[in-house]
Amino acid sequence: MKEAEKMITALVDVREDFPILKRQINGHRLVYLDSAATSQKPKSVIDRITKYYETSNANVLRSVHTLAEEATEQFEESRKKIAGFIHARYPQEIIFTRGTTESLNVIARAWGDKFLKAGDEIVLSPVEHHSNLIPWQQLAERVGAHLRFIDLERDGTITVDAASARINSKTKIVALSAVSNVLGTINPIADIAILAHEVGAIIVVDGAQSVPHQITDVQKLGIDFLAFSGHKMLGPTGIGVLWGRNELLNALDPVIFGGEMIEYVDRENATWAELPAKLEGGTPNIVGAIGLGEATDYLEKIGMPRIEKHVQALTEDAYRRLSSIPDVTVYGPSSPHTGVVSFNIAGVHPHDVAQVLDSQGIAIRAGHHCAQPLMQWLDVIATARASFYLYNSSIDVDSLVDAIKLTRRYFKNGP
Ligand code: PMP
């Protein structure tokens, strides 16, 4: 615990870098515990966006004037930074999208429609966010494939053995989140990737909750596609990434047709540009990509190993302390457990919990967290969820725990 305590306080000073955290909410210091929904942004990212618009704004990849060249250079520089951040082999493996949802939809359309056929199987888990479920449901319906779900342990973890029991010669796609946005579980992606490849399937990883918090090395993980969102890792909204192995991306046909993504067009036909342009039809979110590049600089400056340890220590501390409050049920394993703590207070609707906490300046999420099949598995209609990032500290966990005790007393005994 000593080591964990050290880590918990180690990053407190970064709070100063996040202007919004100076706000008072309902007369209290803002305690932002909703980073799994979207993270706050450091001043360096906010300033970078302003600087781009004030000094270099132009469209990319089109004109040869100075501003257009500057904009293109900065846009492509960001692609290189993001490739480095996830240890991709080539910058052109980074395809800019609007976020995780769009990335997963593109994979399902572009890879799934081309390579899946009737009777093939797609292996998922019951924990998945709707973004990593519905595109596969739709794909299965279009081509006549079947979804297969890995059995969860009682605490919601996914084991390699359970994955192995679902993966067979009919499996063509395994699609899993690396970290659950409800249970905080960390899935054994590298081992499951080996199982997928043994039967000739591909593995698609939803990295929405893992890329912001852990070192991501797509080569070491041995995965085929990765989807993640900029806004959950200190970047702007509306920008995300689809990463794929070069040879897989090369095999895809575009799903968005129009400007920027062509090589040659005549009245009847068109041919496609090289990667990454082939998969980035239309004017991209230029400033979003540049802001995300700046966010990766900031994360690397603080250090991903430090962030990973800090967030996991805070999350496990919150898990332990909330579990010890009577009437409180906390979901998922106690350890390892990262990023989010989902819980319920017996007899109190999570929306009411969130409302009482808001009155104390504490922002949490309440609802099904876009994971309704998981709510069905947990046999609840919703949960409250506190989520943590590098700017949170043990002081925030103290505030959360005190407010939960207050909420419980309030609903049990009245005001
Ligand atoms: N997958 C997971 C695990 C998530 O937590 C989220 C965001 N809540 C998404 C996918 C979807 O991300 P976005 O809305 O940024 O596309």
Image (cartoon, grey):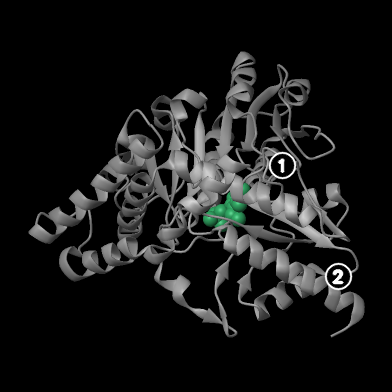
Residue at x-position 56% and y-position 40%: 3
Q: Position of residue 100 (x, y in %)?
A: 53, 49
- Closest to the observer: 330 or 370? 330
In the picture of the structure, the residue carrying the numbered disc 2 is 348
Quadrant location, the C terminus: bottom right
Q: From the image, state whether disc 1 or disc 2 is nearer to you.
A: 2
Q: Position of residue 158 (x, y in %)?
A: 73, 32
Quadrant location, the N terminus: top right
- Closest to the observer: 41 or 31? 31
> Residue 27's quadrant in the figure?
bottom right
In the picture of the structure, the residue carrying the numbered disc 1 is 141
* SS class, disc 1: helix
Q: Please give left or right for residue 286 compared with residue 368 in the image.
A: left
Residue type at the position of mark 1: Glu
Residue type at the position of mark 2: Val
Q: Dot 2, how many residues are within 10 Å of its Cα: few (below 14), some (14-19), or many (20+)?
A: some
